[in-house]
Amino acid sequence: MKRIYVDNAATTRVTETARRVFIETMDNTWGNPSSLHSIGQAAAETLLKARQDVAGCLNAPRERDIYFTSGGSEADNQALRTGAAMGKKKGKMHIVSTKFEHHAVLHCLKKLEKEGFEITLLDVGREGLVTPQQVEEAIRPDTCLVSVMFANNEIGTIQPIAEIGAVCRKHGVLFHTDAVQAVGHLPIDVQAMNIDMLSMSGHKFGAPKGVGALYARNGIWLTNIIDGGAQERGRRAGTENLPGIVAMAAALQEACANMEEHSKKVTALRDRLIEGLSQLPLTIVNGSLEHRLPGNVNVCFQGIEGESLLLLLDAKGIEASSGSACTSGSLDPSHVLLALGLPHEVAHGSLRLSLNQDNTEEDVDYMLKEIPQVVSYLRSISPVWEAIEKGEIHYAI
Ligand SMILES: *Cc1c(COP(=O)(O)O)cnc(C)c1O
């Protein structure tokens, strides 16, 4: 059976380039970059080159402002801990973020709250967008950090990051962005956008899992999450994951070089899917259509359960998701869809299709044929569908 992978927001297939350099690095550059002998120094040079390449793709002014981590979650935690620690020193213990951040941000903020910080989580509205005005209004004299994600992993909405960066700079508040869904997919310039700290993760753009990076501009003294040796300028201990780092740098360069072409192709596929699926009765498209990642489709079908939909779609060869991978297995609806103001019953019927450049027109044809059939079938056996269709059950949307 044909299998269509449309869960690229959860993870991506490793690209041919990334796979090749990963293996080459393992085979040939297996030294420890901290060693002084030749094989170690070769590894150190390779590491420096990867750091320069990543810095280049983000327009970071200095390669040493890139700190390699184990992924996006670690980078998010380190950024938040850093903003909190820098604030605490000055007696500033208020942090501004949003209701629809990734759990790597939200759960870390919960902990900081227990440690005495005050957290303001901004609403994201029906469109899934935060405005610079909201951020400005939330900033107080004791605000030490603003953290707003670049693009949302469930609904794909792109935030006005440059404008938010400008607001934060104006008020002298540190600005972090979780750019895990954006890096390699959208143009990013940390200097022009006034970004102080940025998190990224390799496996969301064709590199292997378990490698990411945190950009922190000159003058930010990162708080260690992992103590030990002096790697990453003493801010992140542990022998570097060189094959992963080199593969990530290669995947990023490749993604950035092909960004325009991929974006154009994927956007066209996305728009056809959204157009087709939104024709189905009592179906809602989630998040702004205008400010949206090229590959993101997110819809709610009233009267059905996302979990049953996923299982039936998988049986048809369609590999999708109904919210974030991290919450699948739990019965709570997605916090992102609830933040949009959707009722629980509607949020339960969500489907996320996240495309990338490997998807084709044929994939879209197939999905537009199969998904409506599966939705109709599930509605036909749903205990509430008839009442919803007749208008006896009405959800405030
Ligand atoms: C995937 C993801 C993360 C976590 O990254 P990992 O490398 O899997 O730890 C964080 N934030 C967002 C927005 C993500 O999509």
Image (spheres, rainbow, N blue to C red):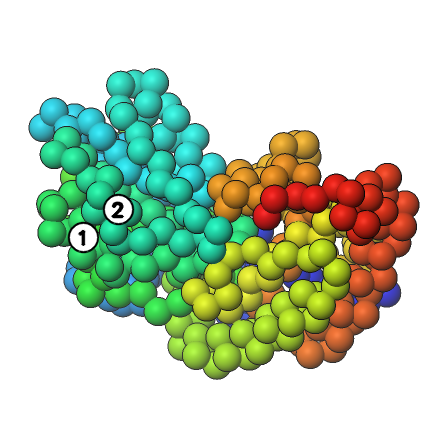
Q: Secondary structure at mark 2?
A: helix
Viewer-closest of 42 and 336: 336
Q: Secondary structure at mark 1?
A: helix
Viewer-closest of 300 and 107: 300
Amino acid type assigned to the residue bearing label 2 in the image: Val
Viewer-closest of 111 and 167: 167
Q: Mark 2 and mark 1 in contact? Answer it, CB < 8 Å.
A: yes
| Direction from residue 278 to residue 63 in the image, left or right | left
| Direction from residue 149 to residue 268 in the image, left or right | right
Quarter of the rendering containing residue 272? bottom right
Percent x, y of residue 286: 56, 55
Percent x, y of residue 161: 30, 58
What residue is drawn where x is 63% and y is 32%? Answer: 332
Q: Is residue 68 above or below residue 182?
A: above
Amino acid type assigned to the residue bearing label 1 in the image: Val
- Give the alpha-carbon distance from disc 2 to disc 1, as whole Å: 8 Å
Q: Which residue is mark 2?
A: 135
Quarter of the rendering containing residue 396? top right
Q: Is residue 305 above or below residue 23?
A: above
What residue is drawn where x is 33% and y is 47%? Answer: 148
What residue is drawn where x is 18% and y is 49%? Answer: 168
| Direction from residue 9 to residue 58 in the image, left or right | left
In which quadrant of the rendered image does the N terminus lie? bottom right
Packing grade of label 2 (10 A; few <14, some 14-19, many >=20) is: many
Disc number at residue 167? 1
Percent x, y of residue 34: 28, 45
Ligand 1 within 8 Å of disc 2? The answer is no
Residue 309 visible to the viewer: yes
Percent x, y of residue 268: 57, 78
